[in-house]
Amino acid sequence: MGSKVHCYPSSINGGEISNYSTLETETLTGVTVSRTSNDGDDTDGEFDDVTKISILRDPSIEVIKDWSWDDVFQNGRVDRGEIVTFSVSITNTGNVSVENFVFTETFTDLRDTQPPDLSGELSPLTTKSPEIILPGETIVYTRL
């Protein structure tokens, strides 16, 4: 006999899972007997303490920046008048939630030959501002 516990992000974020079981039965003479599970360590003076499992928290994110363009002139290169779209995907690859993050993008064209009208056509950054990114979740920022 045993039990299984699903590890939700809140359990992992908290750093531990606590678990206990209670058994209650009645003897043939009508006496009720009750027992709470133990963590297996009676040397601490506790005979019915909960079992605690420590969980290693492993925060990690992956950031991928990609771009595409509408090849209006169908020549395989970016030309004046075509629209370039930048996308940044942020994926929580860790096992804990990511909270209170700041995403900043700086767009700089370093070519001296760049006509000023090309870099002047940037649209404002499209953002999602979630308070929390759960493990396995991806958010995408897009800029035209």
Image (cartoon, rainbow, N blue to C red):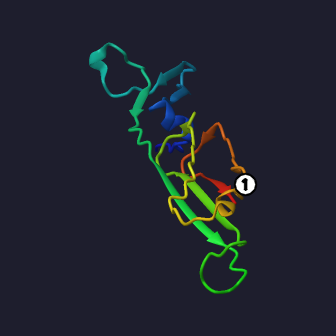
| x then y, percent, for residue 83 | 70, 68
Q: Quadrant of the C terminus?
A: bottom right
| x then y, percent, for residue 69 | 66, 72
Q: Dot 1, crowdedness within 10 Å: few (<14), some or many (≥20)? A: few
Residue drawn at point x = 47 percent, y = 24 percent: 36
Residue 71, image quadrant: bottom right
| x then y, percent, for residue 130 | 66, 41
Residue 9, image quadrant: top right
Instruction: Please name whichever residue, 94 or 119, is drawn nearer the observer in this view of the structure.
Output: 119
* Residue hosting label 1: 123
Q: Residue furthest top?
A: 45
Q: Is residue 54 left or right of residue 81?
A: left
Instruction: Please name whichever residue, 63 or 91, is drawn nearer the observer in this view of the structure.
Output: 63
Q: Tag 1, which secondary structure?
A: loop
| x then y, percent, for residue 13 | 50, 34
Q: Against 17, is 126 above or below?
A: below
Instruction: Please name whichever residue, 72 or 38, is drawn nearer the observer in this view of the structure.
Output: 72
| Marker count (numbered) | 1
Residue type beneath disc 1: Ser
